[in-house]
């Protein structure tokens, strides 16, 4: 049995999640949720990023569905913030950042000159999870978020989302990025589960298909940056390699995250009774192995490097907590996919994914988890605390999903799986003979 389906291991994971949710409550402010420092305090003068409030709504929706007291009021506060403070009541959509002080109507004041697809994707994810948790105003928020995706972000010509728009949506830059599309894919899969509308799964598959083609041509390293025609721009941000959202080169963490999303999308196709392309599991495996080879312990010390160049040379050797969190989720997903078939499971592969899971969890326990819900967000190459890229402990989204990944199926999405009573029952998709059985 090992760590999978172990009662004691699940208790450890459960404790980590409760600690994270307790720590995250410190981020509540009038306008939504703010970025926390190392001790969990929010600077009262700091601008509020949209993605942080969205992530908090998402994770506290999961806590609500798990029956953890205190989570409902956090979701409700966040839904109100997204509906009133962050929403652009003149042009529609959501401000990417707002000033910490609201106006006399309780509306936010834009602190950024653009709106971002990255953050808007998290609005859709937050609304989807809150709707599953049946919180007040969540269905209305979800309807607005879906309209926003249709009207402002989805580009039907290239079957991807544009990266940014002006506040009035009249212009966009020449930049296109895989990061925004990756999180949009995550949100579309969650939205597909909630609404059962096929177009969200179709769009997620389109994003995954383009990612796969570009990664395959780059030895399974995913190019991050593109022109408006979706031509890779491999030298983008070479002068600013450590950017939080658009770093130069390739990001092993995104290889892990896309591997997980491929398995999740495969499960969504199976549950919908649709044909599953043969390339999905092969691509997920290739991405995982490439990210593992490029990213893990490159200097002889454990941990994933942040970025590499297009040939796999290390660019930023610092370790970001979100990368190992996504690697945990990817190892879980690929192990489960191998068990689910079709065909006889490859026991060697399964053992390898289990080894990776244990290794990554042990790393988090030794280097990332400080205690009382505090996870280090950035470590240097020597695994000592660093704050040059991600100061403080801004949010708990990646860590919560990492400690929940092993306890629910890969598909449906987290909120839907919890709502269906699948917590600590991930085998419910069927693993008796290595084949999926549909619920």
Image (cartoon, rainbow, N blue to C red):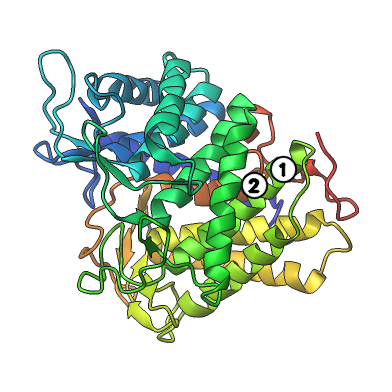
Side (left or right) of 200 relative to 99: right
* Of 199 and 361, the residue lying toward us: 199
The kind of secondary structure element at disc 2 is helix
Q: Is residue 30 above or below residue 205?
A: above
Q: Residue furthest bottom?
A: 300
Q: Position of residue 47 (x, y in %)?
A: 15, 39
Quarter of the figure that contains the N terminus: bottom right
Q: Secondary structure at mark 1?
A: helix
Q: CA distance from mark 1 to mark 2?
A: 6 Å
Q: Residue 253 in the image: x percent, y percent?
A: 46, 64
Measured as percent of width and height from the top left, residue 218 is found at 51, 75
Does residue 208 sit above or below 360 in this rendering?
Answer: above
Which residue does the image show at 24% across and 33% down from the upper left? 95
Q: Is residue 95 visible?
A: yes
Q: Is residue 330 above or below residue 207?
A: below
Give the tally of numbered discs. 2
Answer whether residue 3 is visible to the viewer in this image.
Answer: no
Which residue: 55% across, 43% down? 14
Q: Which mark is residue 199?
A: none
Q: Which residue is mark 2?
A: 265
Residue shown at 66%/42% (left/top)?
Answer: 411
Density class for disc 2 (Cα within 10 Å; few <14, some 14-19, many ≥20) is: many
Binning the other alpha carbons within 10 Å of mark 1 as few (below 14), some (14 to 19) or many (20 upward) gives some
Name the spot of residue 193 as percent of width and height, x first: 62, 32
At x 74%, y 71%, the residue is: 349
Q: Is 74 displayed left or right of 327 in the figure?
A: left
Q: Say if mark 1 contacts mark 2, CB within 8 Å.
A: yes
Label 1: which residue?
269
Name the quadrant of the C terminus.
Answer: top right
Asked whether 117 or 298 is in front, the reply is 117
């Amino acid at each position: 049995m090992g760590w999978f389906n172990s009662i004691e291991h699940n208790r450890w994971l459960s404790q980590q999640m409760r600690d994270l949710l307790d720590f995250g409550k410190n981020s509540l402010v009038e306008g939504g949720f703010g970025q926390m420092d190392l001790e969990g305090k929010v600077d009262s003068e700091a601008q509020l990023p949209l993605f942080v409030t969205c992530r908090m709504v998402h994770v506290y929706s999961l806590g609500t569905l798990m029956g953890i007291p205190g989570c409902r009021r956090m979701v409700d506060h966040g839904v109100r913030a997204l509906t009133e403070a962050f929403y652009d009541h003149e042009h529609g959509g959501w401000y990417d950042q707002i000033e910490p002080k609201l106006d006399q109507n309780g509306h936010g004041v834009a602190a950024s000159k653009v709106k971002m697809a990255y953050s808007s994707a998290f609005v859709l994810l937050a609304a989807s999870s809150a709707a599953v948790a049946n919180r007040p105003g969540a269905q209305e928020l979800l309807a607005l978020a879906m309209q926003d995706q249709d009207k402002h972000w989805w580009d039907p010509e290239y079957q991807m989302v544009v990266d940014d728009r002006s506040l009035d949506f009249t212009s966009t830059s020449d930049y296109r990025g895989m990061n925004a599309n990756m999180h949009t894919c995550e949100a579309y899969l969650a939205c597909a589960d909630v609404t059962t509308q096929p177009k969200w799964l179709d769009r997620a598959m389109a994003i995954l298909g383009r990612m796969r083609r570009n990664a395959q041509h780059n030895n399974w390293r995913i190019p991050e940056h593109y022109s408006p025609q979706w031509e890779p721009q491999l030298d983008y941000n070479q002068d600013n390699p450590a950017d939080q959202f658009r770093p130069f080169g390739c990001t092993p963490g995104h290889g892990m995250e896309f591997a997980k999303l491929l398995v999740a999308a495969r499960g969504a196709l199976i549950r919908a009774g649709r044909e599953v392309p043969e390339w999905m599991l092969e691509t997920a495996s290739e991405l995982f192995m490439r990210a593992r080879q490029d990213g893990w312990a490159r200097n002889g010390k454990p941990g994933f490097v942040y970025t590499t160049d297009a040939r796999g040379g290390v660019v930023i050797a610092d370790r970001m907590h979100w990368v190992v969190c996504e690697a945990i989720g990817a190892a879980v997903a690929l192990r489960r996919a191998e068990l689910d078939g079709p065909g006889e499971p490859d026991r060697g592969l399964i053992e390898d994914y289990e080894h990776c899971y244990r290794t990554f969890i042990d790393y988090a326990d030794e280097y990332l988890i400080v205690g009382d819900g505090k996870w280090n967000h950035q470590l240097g190459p020597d695994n000592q605390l660093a704050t040059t890229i991600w100061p403080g402990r801004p949010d708990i989204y990646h860590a919560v999903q990492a400690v929940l990944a092993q306890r629910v199926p890969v598909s449906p999405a987290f909120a839907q799986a919890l709502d269906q009573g699948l917590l600590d029952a991930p085998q419910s998709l069927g693993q008796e003979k290595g084949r999926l059985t549909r619920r």
